[in-house]
Image (cartoon, rainbow, N blue to C red):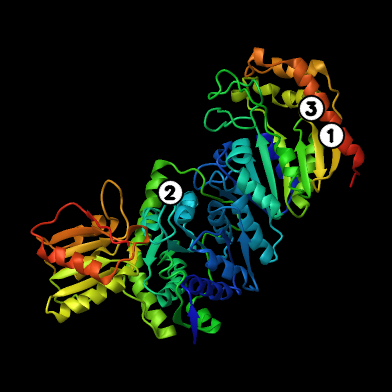
Amino acid sequence: MSTEFLSGNHASALAATLAGRANRGGRGFGGGIYPITPQTECVEYLCQQEFERGEIVRVESEHSAMGVCIGMAFAGARTFTASSSNGLAYMTENVFAAALYRLPIVMMAVNRTLGPPWNIWVDHGDTLMLRDSGWLQFYCENNQEVFDTTLLAWRLAEDHRVLLPVMVNQDAFVLSHTMMQIEVPGLEQVERFLPLLRLPHQLTEKPVTFGGLDFPHETEVHRRQHAEAMARVPAVYREVQREFEQHFGRRPADAVDGYRMDDAEVALVAMSTMSSTVRAVVDSARARGQKVGAVRLYMFRPFPEQDLRQALRPCRRVGFLDRDISLGLGGVLWAEGRAMAPAGCLVQNYIVGLGGGDVRPQDVQGILDDLVARQRAEEPRILEVAT
Amino acid sequence: MSIALNMLSRGIGQRPVQLVIPACCGIVTAGAFPCSAYGAPVLAATFASAAAFATGLARVAQMNGEATRVICFAGDGGTYDIGMATLSAAAERDEDLLYICYDNEIYGNTGGQRSSATPLGARTSTTPGGKLQQKKDALGIMAAHRIPYAAAVSLAHPEDAFAKFQDAVGRRGFRFLHVLSPCPTGWKSEPADGIELVRLAVRSGLYPVYTVFDGRRVRVDVEPELDRGALEQYFARQGRFRGDLIDLEAIAAAIRENWDDLRRHAAGGERP
């Protein structure tokens, strides 16, 4: 284990490099890559690495980047790519295809606002757009978590009870371009944690067709199997947490990461880096005697329904802080999570930090004050916090 | 299409292959899940992605020292239109792939809409008044990538076709084969006339059968007769063309010009 000073982009690329090298005794490693701000440093880093059995293919679009990953994964290699925002929108068809083919591809996505107009800063609308794509999704809070999640993503994806692709998300610039001190394991440690990939449906010389015509009943069965694999993820993830801790001495976060929630009457729910700010506000509220807690959704797909329901059980008031907006509805976290609040609980949605607007402690404090003071919930509130 | 697949299969022989087939009639005839009609492993690709999926398969085969030959089999829609960027990029990277376009000059699977391979004057379901633009020269575009091997295949000349399939499967680097592939439904022609139509297209000079090596050396594989009768027959035996948009004089002139160019390139080149 060594200590490195890395940006979120480089942390992810380093984890991918180690995971890729760890499969050199298997079918190797690779992926198609295409640059987009703010993901570029990740793929540049990868292109500077040497792989004994690995190939990074510099393609002409995000659509083909995922296409090359699909081909490599079908040939049995461990695969990785990275993208962001409009790149993900362009890639979308093959994002869905990767999951429907049940391929254990790992993609790092830097969350960036969709355009036009063009905005390179963080919000979560890009990857939440892909929430129905059949991928697992994790939203990271710091660079150590970006590194760790990238590594454990393969352990989860390649588990034969799962066999699904995993998206590891980090906030644009706040993590992607901010350097932090992180603990990095050696290759041998990574090799012990990540067994060689054995894809049960690898394309070989056997005359079978993958992805051909499905009639309605076959599709019903395939979707049910996909849904069952998703349903197995929480239990498999808890195993992976334990394994990761045994190998690296750090315990990855729970799917639903509660903070001072045991007796919390008021909870603020958020994702990614905004959660750190929320926790700081919770601490100061607690110091004033308010029974306030924070909940961070680390895993978003599969949606950790049970864990969120459990975490929110003591609450009378819950605020969902969404750095995204499903236009015509409201925040996606709120829309999906509001039913997990206990009966009679006041649930209010705050849409905050769109387009990378800096969400400061006083903004979250304002949300908390509003939540505590209000008589009833109303339509999602779209806040303007950017200066 | 089925004749082309048959010849391809003979060209492959016993060599291990993997087929990548995007949306097109060729993936429908591969059969419904979990069957496979082709006796070879097939990856059914998203429409625009055949060359990208194939790149992935070929790279991993290569890094594992395997002899597997990866072959894309795609229609004109998947090649000339939606797949062109992906195809161009794979050719530019000189991926170790054989890409075969069987060109029926329409989106056949969806019921016969115009593609950029549809010739001038052809009625399709989206050009009911006849197409007003020329067909795109995909073989020329691919040859311009300076790929090792780009060739037109005539199904009416089985020996030449078989030799090309065999040659193209075995070569390294990016290979492109273009196969004119009649579609009786879309061409409004007799099914039994399919091969005859290809023969007429070749005899008239409308469909030049040639090979380009490394984007520079041109070899003419079948000498056309530049036969005006064959040209007339080609159009007369199909119901898809709108008569008043077909100017045989202009087409014959364009054919001569095209052949002048081809012969000039071929003369300057050398046979391999």
Q: Secondary structure at mark 3?
A: helix
User: How far is mark 2 from mark 3, CA to CA?
Assistant: 50 Å
Q: Secondary structure at mark 1?
A: helix
Q: Which residue is mark 3?
A: B202
Q: Are marks 2 and 3 on the same chain?
A: no
User: How far is mark 1 from mark 2, CA to CA?
Assistant: 47 Å
Residue positioned 62% across, 73% down in the render = A49
Q: Nearer the viewer, residue B93 or A248?
A: B93
- Identify the amino acid type marked 2: Pro
**Chain assignment, label 2:** A
**Chain assignment, label 3:** B
Q: Which residue is mark 1?
A: B262
From the top left corner, tell me how far across and down residue A169 is, in percent. 41, 65
Q: Are marks 1 and 3 on the same chain?
A: yes
From the top left corner, tell me how far across and down residue A2 is, in percent. 50, 87
From the top left corner, tell me how far across and down residue B65 is, in percent. 70, 66
Eye-nearest disc, 2 or 3: 2
Q: Which residue is mark 2?
A: A116
The answer to whether any part of residue B77 appears in the image is yes
